[in-house]
Amino acid sequence: MTKLLVVKANNIIEASYHLSLNEQRLILAALANMPKGEKVTDDVGYCVTRESFIELGVNPKNASREIREACDRLFNRTITITTEMGTFKTRWVQDVMKYNSDWALANPDFVREMTGSDPYAEDYVLAAIRFSKSVLPFLSNLSSNFTQYFLQDIAGVSSGYSIRFYELMMQFKSTGYRKIKLDDLRNMLELNDKYPLTADLKRWVIDTAIDELNEKSPITIKYQLLKTGRKFTHLELKFEAKDKTSIQLKKDPNTPDFFIKLSDPQRHFFASKMSEMPEMSKYSQGTESYQQFAIRIADMLLQPERFRELYPLLEKAGYN
């Protein structure tokens, strides 16, 4: 799952919707299999396997059942998206296909080719998600105003709020800082009248997400609630990549053999920031998308000569 990239338009990141944890997993697993930087149509279904749910932290004993239940609920879920023209409400998906195990056993070559999974596994289940025509433009062939992160970053989280908070921070990964109005946060999470008291919002939503992300994600987060007058009105988030202090520097940056071996989460975290820098344009290959460029930069950071060349920009991206 190391290279599975999730890409969403910022309109989706800030949209108003409520999905259960498994419904979010279903969408993310499908999105991770969607071609990046290519136009896709709404007549294509993207597969979700039992194995993909297990990789996201679902108990293997429950994975098949939870996929089936999430498929049933997801079909009725809506999302409210704000654009320059206005706000519109639509469904996430136009259909969800649940292939049964008998069909998979009768077509094992197709299943292996399309999903890489084993149809002979016990309690096998395969789903295919076909996104709605209205939502699809915010999920594919994006060249600007989008947010991206690796699916493994949120593997193992047990709260749907954790995923939403992680995406809201990744939207501002270049600065490591985000300030959100509490009213906007409630709207994005579609809380309606739930947790009207700030103390309850803090306990059941904010602390739940931040504590879990500090434990399980590749970033460390600090936050505080800010007041306007006597009322709490804003949430301030500050975050950075983990494990910076565990990296051992080799001599001086100006020495010929200077090289720092970054962890995979660090490489991809900083490569994503660097892909948006004007100074990196000379390394771009024309038609590639930001996410494709970021993956290539992450590979460049594994090469000692390239690493020394890119080190000043790595520092500018926040590495120290």
Image: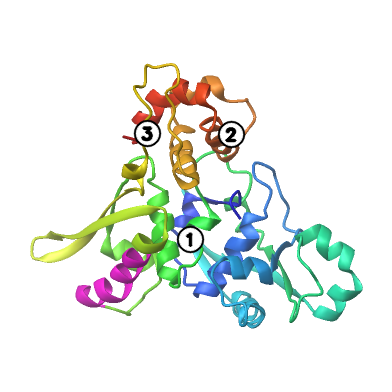
State the residue position of label 3: 317
State the residue position of label 1: 154
For the point 38% across and 28% down, the residue is: 250
Three-letter amino acid code at disc 3?
A: Ala
The range drawn in magenta is 196-212
State the residue position of label 2: 296
Three-letter amino acid code at disc 1?
A: Ile
For the point 32% across and 79% down, the residue is: 193
Give percent across and percent down for residue 308.
Answer: 45, 22
For the point 74% across and 62% down, the residue is: 45
Label 3 or label 2, whichever comes before in sequence order: 2
Residue 303 in sight from this viewpoint: yes
Residue in front for this viewpoint, 239 or 9? 239
User: Could you say which quadrant of the image residue 127 lies in?
Assistant: bottom right
For the point 31% across and 43% down, the residue is: 245
Say if 113 sits above or below 250 in the image. Answer: below
Residue 145 in sight from this viewpoint: no
Count of numbered labels shown in the rendering? 3
Alpha carbons under labels 1 and 3: distance apart: 22 Å
Helix, strand or loop at mark 1? helix
Give percent across and percent down for residue 101.
Answer: 81, 79
Contact (Cβ within 8 Å) of mark 3 with mark 2: no
Q: Is residue 167 left or right of residue 136?
A: left
Alpha carbons under labels 3 and 2: distance apart: 16 Å
**Residue count near mark 3 (Cα–Cα under 10 Å), binned few <14, some 14–19, many ≥20:** many
